[in-house]
Amino acid sequence: IKKIEMMEKKLLNKYTAIIYSSEWAKQSTINYYDIEPGKIHVVEFGANIPTPSDYKIDIQTDICNLVFIGKNWQKKGGDKVLGAYRKLKSDGFRCTLTIIGSIIRESYDEDENLVIIPYLDKSKPEHLERFCNILQEAHFLVLPTEFDAFGIVFCEASAYAVPSIAANVGGVSQPVREGKNGYLLMPDATAEDYAEKIKSVFADKENYLKLRMSSRQEFETRLNWEVWSEKVNKILEEIVEEHHKNNGNKQQ
């Protein structure tokens, strides 16, 4: 491991520019490998779905549709999401929960408002359509993940104007901006904490709809691959220009 890390440090020092998707990744590299900060750039990733035009800002709010998306039930905080859902229902809060990509690892009572979809492959048109239809009707993406370096799923939620309620770990604070396209809770936040946050945000209908609008704006201005491409191209152009400039000075 030490040899691999030494090799990585040598390579990172050799590179003219390094591009990461989050400030967390940038700071981790600076602190761990002692890399020059000026050569590291942060450019957010985009959503791995077609840019939707059928997103909803003024969505019905008589019932709150929650979505959890994650393959690793435990690591992505599935138990907390299920606990939050149960807490909300016990409080008389009208809601549904759709779980995508995981299977609940415990016994549970049959519930018509709890939908479990163990697997969706977005490369298949019918699966992609179902995925997008779920986001189109969703009110919150809830992801109390134990760790994520970024989280493309947050970009996809924002594409459909869906705010995220997530754990403030790793690079999650890069795609999810507090009060812009969601809210971040402490890593040790409980299922009850998530339930209370969902209730408090959803209770203020006017501000909730404004949150949906700003969630979509975050997608349009930051969290899409077109913006990523423009920013990366600009970085590359500046590198080439600086290279030509330095070579020209050497020849003179």
Image (cartoon, rainbow, N blue to C red):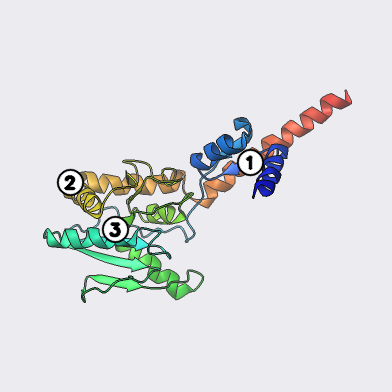
Upstream in the sequence, badge 3 or badge 2?
3
What residue does disc 3 label?
80
Q: Which residue is at a point 32% across and 72% down the rendered structure image?
A: 116
Q: Is residue 191 above or below residue 108?
A: above
- Discs 3, 2 touching: Cβ within 8 Å: no
Characterize the local packing of mark 1: few (<14), some (14-19) or many (20 or more) Cα atoms within 10 angstroms: some
How far apart in space, not on screen, are marks 3 and 2 (Cα)? 23 Å
Q: Residue 185 versus residue 229: which sits nearer the camera?
A: 185
Q: What label sits on residue 204 in the rendered view?
A: 2
| Amino acid type assigned to the residue bearing label 2 in the image | Asp
Question: Callout 3: helix, strand or loop?
Answer: helix
Q: Is residue 226 above or below residue 127?
A: above
Q: Residue 33 versus residue 165: which sits nearer the camera?
A: 33
Q: Position of residue 84 (x, y in %)?
A: 23, 58
Q: Which residue is at a point 24% across and 73% down the rendered structure image?
A: 108
What residue does disc 1 label?
18
Upstream in the sequence, badge 1 or badge 2?
1
Characterize the local packing of mark 3: few (<14), some (14-19) or many (20 or more) Cα atoms within 10 angstroms: many
Q: Which residue is at a point 31% across and 41% down the rendered structure image?
A: 179
Instruction: Classify residue 1 as left or right of residue 82.
Output: right
Q: Position of residue 167 (x, y in %)?
A: 35, 48
Quadrant in the picture for residue 245:
top right
Q: What label sits on residue 52 in the rendered view?
A: none
